[in-house]
Image (cartoon, rainbow, N blue to C red):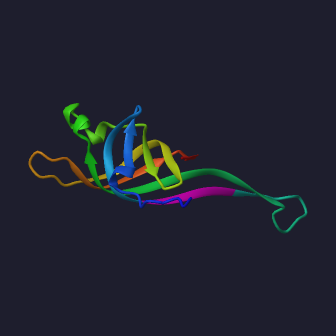
Amino acid sequence: MAVTKTIPTTADIYLELNGTKIAVVQSYRVTATRSARTIQAFGQEEPVATIRGAASYRLELTRIYATDTAIRDGLDFQSVSDFNLVICKPDRNVIYTGCEWAELEESAEVGGTVLERVVITATHRLESAK
């Protein structure tokens, strides 16, 4: 039996707060960084080991649309804190948790709520099989 894999759509990338979808995202770009520290030993010219530090994630989101429920509830993106970014891929879900926004670029028409570009940082990246 062949398994059909679908290409993720806007509905497959979204922001979540307290288990509720608050916005859908058109696209994303992630940059993961990790610090590292070398260990020196007395009498050695070169490090004897490298210890990896914690990872951090910087995510650039484009075209973020608030859900109808979030709009009715008076969602204010600037006050949102400690939220998740969920990315549904064909074979697994990737969830970035502990998200905080760093930059917001808003563009809206009358009655609309669209963020053109948002930069967020996340503390954790989790994967779960579908």
Magenta stretch: helix, strand or loop mostly: strand
Residue lying at 40% horizontally and 58% vertically, measured from the top left: 8
Q: Residue furthest front?
A: 1
Indicate whether 11 appears above or below 82: below
The location of residue 6, given as percent across then percent down, is 43, 59
Residue lying at 43% horizontally and 46% vertically, measured from the top left: 85
Q: Residue furthest right?
A: 43
Say which quadrant the N terminus sits in.
bottom right
9 or 21: nearer the viewer: 9
The location of residue 46, given as percent across then percent down, is 82, 68
The location of residue 62, given as percent across then percent down, is 32, 58
Residue lying at 63% horizontally and 56% vertically, measured from the top left: 35
Whether residue 75 can be seen here:
no
> How many numbered callouts?
0
The location of residue 112, given as percent across then percent down, is 15, 47
Is residue 34 left or right of 46 when viewed as pictured? left
Q: Is residue 15 magenta?
A: no
Residue lying at 51% horizontally and 49% vertically, measured from the top left: 94
Give the magenta part as a residue range.
29-36
51 or 15: nearer the viewer: 15
68 or 49: nearer the viewer: 68
Whether residue 86 can be seen here:
yes
